[in-house]
Image (cartoon, helix red, strand yellow):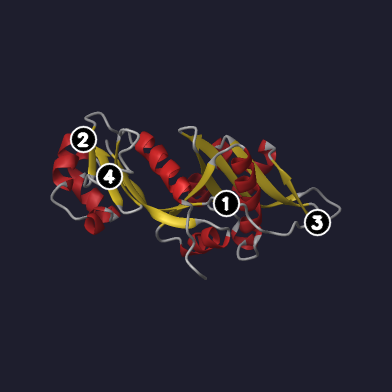
Amino acid sequence: MEPLELDPGTVAIIQLAWSRVLGFEDTAFADSSTGRLYRTDSNAPVITFVTMFGKEALVGPDWAVAAAQQLPGPVLRQHSTLLTLSREYGGRGLGEAQLFFSDALPDLDPDPSAAVSSEPAFVTQLERLCPPDDSAEAGLSSAEYPFVLLDDSGDGAPRPLSGAGYDVWSGILAHLGVLTPPQHRRRGFAQRIVAVAVEEAMAAGLIPQWRVRTDNTASQRTARRAGFAFAGTQTSVILGA
């Protein structure tokens, strides 16, 4: 599959959004004249290191910023590095993830045997079919806009096949979460419900963003098949006991 590319205008909007998400000036990520971005926050509950479109940024307490200045990006974005730096401060893992974005409507034929619902009961039912860690990562039960793909072809009650939902970040990004029960994976259901969420997000004027754990190669493949382009990484650790 050929690498997916984003429109330069989309890239500029994503850079604006992430500058705001991390608390920088609006033009910070787009400014090619500066090196790695740093923002010191003595009260930050999380250390966050982001690479995006060739730019790097770190937000955290002063001791984390000082330590990060001595490390190259490929080392700093490793989850083990941030855990080591924060060990004395109670650092615990949030993990390393890849960031994908989309600026094209998905091209999928509708499935006449499937229906889509945003009813909380179907979200809850879907989460019960999935491992707790997967449900927690997707966060569909807390998503502002959840969507569940249902099998409505039988005589009984509809059954959830997969789900996707999003929260709005900075009024610009639709941050997606995707969840599929193990027994329904590798059948294209995630791709179909992601298409629904992407269409809804774009209709609202948002840019869909999909964050996928670095070790979750299956979700990375699904993201690319759904028309998402890789843009960078996010590595974070939570501070405190």
The tag earlier along the polypeptide, 1 or 2, is: 2
The residue at the point 49 percent across, 36 percent down is: 172
Residue 33 in percent (x, y) is at 23, 45
Residue 25 in percent (x, y) is at 31, 33
Q: Residue 179: which disc?
A: 1
Q: Is residue 91 above or below residue 130?
A: above
Q: How many marks?
A: 4
Q: Secondary structure at mark 1?
A: strand
Disc 3 to disc 1, C-alpha distance: 21 Å
Which residue is at the front of the view, 5 or 124?
A: 5
Q: Is residue 97 visible?
A: no
The tag earlier along the polypeptide, 3 or 2, is: 2
The residue at the point 31 percent across, 54 percent down is: 54
Q: Is residue 207 visible?
A: yes
Q: Are marks 2 and 4 in contact (CB under 8 Å)?
A: no
The tag earlier along the polypeptide, 4 or 3, is: 4
Q: Are marks 3 and 1 in contact (CB under 8 Å)?
A: no
Q: Residue 57: which disc?
A: 4
Question: Which of labels 1 and 2 is toward the front?
Answer: 2
Q: Is residue 234 left or right of residue 209?
A: left
State the residue position of label 3.
112
Question: Which of labels 1 and 4 is toward the front?
Answer: 4
Q: Is residue 177 above or below residue 5?
A: above
State the residue position of label 2.
61
The residue at the point 67 percent across, 46 percent down is: 148
Question: Which of labels 2 and 4 is toward the front?
Answer: 4
